[in-house]
Amino acid sequence: MTSPAQPEVLRAPLVVEFPFTRSLGPVQSAFLSGLRERTVLGVKTGDGTVMVPPVEYDPVTAEEIRDLVEVSATGTVTTWAWNPEPRRGQPLDRPFAWVLVKLDGADTALLHALDATGPDAVHTGQRVRVRWAEEREGAITDIACFEPYEGDGTETEVAPHSGEFEDAVTGIVAPARLDYTYSPGGAQTRYINALAERCTVGERCPSCRKVYIPPRGACPTCGLATTDQVEVGPGGTVTTYCIVNIKAKNLDIDVPYVYAHIALDGADLALHGRIAGIPYDQVRMGLRVEPVWTEGGRYPDHYRPTGEPDADYDTYKEMI
């Protein structure tokens, strides 16, 4: 006898993206404001070391440092690595070298891109200079990249700098983005495929007999595989909830709305879902709810009250 064919494990591209916003202290503010004005600033530590990019605290003594100096826009490659396939958001859209460059007048190296024709055109000790971006806004991207430079590496005298600029940069917004292919694994593939049939299926631990939803393929308590599939719900009980007052990007739901943990009947773990069909200020712990499916939907759009009496606290307290 042959065993039934296992469904193909699901895979899908997934993007996690958000803006990272931070304020700047006086040293970083001066550094980025300087880049906007085609000026590269470093900071001199207590022992006379000139650090570029600058830091706000001495790495040796941990003392606060504010002694800003201007260094040259030319420098020397200290080490490098070739990047044959640039990714989205990188400095250049063609193959380039990642380089550490010690700018003339600095004692530490700055990481950036070197525009070169190929790996044979890059070497340690190579002289380079900054290629400034045409439009600058006070960010590290104001340095578009480095480019080869034929000048020599004569000793450069650093010049003290006040760090003062008109309309100084006081904060930055850096977009963070992660692109990858996500696979939910066998257990969640079965769960997702069942949802597409409007059926919610968990898996039971053979030892403690708890039913987990969504399933993970193994019991988190006993460590045993949960191969026994169990249909749960469709009804359930609100165990805890929160009122959402901030509208999420690309989510067409008016605020305020309620997101809740819902213990489906027959499950030993609460899942989360949106509550609708009731004023947000009437949602409560113990509220009995059921899923609402949209036409063609592969999962419940939201949960609504069933009209049943509220569940007794003792029936769901272990899942709060």
Image (spheres, rainbow, N blue to C red):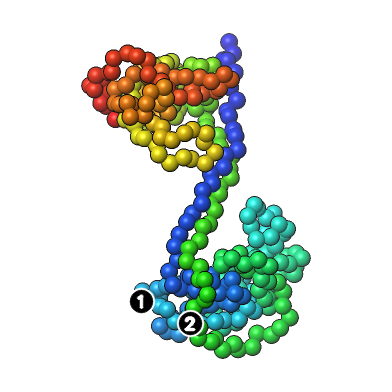
Q: Quadrant of the N terminus?
A: top right
Judge depth for marks 2 and 1 and give the one in front.
2
Callout 1: few (<14), some (14-19), or many (20+) C-alpha neighbours within 10 Å? few
Question: Where is residue 39 drawn, in percent x and y?
Answer: 59, 77
Residue for badge 2:
162
Residue furthest to the left: 314
Amino acid type assigned to the residue bearing label 1 in the image: Glu
Question: Where is residue 131 drawn, in percent x and y?
Answer: 68, 71
Question: Where is residue 10 drawn, in percent x and y?
Answer: 58, 29
Query: In this orientation, which residue lies closer to the viewer: 11 or 167?
Result: 167
Query: In this orientation, which residue lies closer to the viewer: 161 or 147?
Result: 161
Above or below 171: residue 87: above
Residue for badge 1:
63
Callout 2: few (<14), some (14-19), or many (20+) C-alpha neighbours within 10 Å? few
Q: Give the residue at x 37% y 15%.
A: 306
Query: Is residue 234 rendered to the left or right of residue 12?
Result: left
Q: Give the residue at x 72% y 74%.
A: 148
Query: Is residue 305 rendered to the left or right of residue 247?
Result: left
Query: In this orientation, which residue lies closer to the viewer: 193 or 17?
Result: 17
Residue furthest to the right: 117
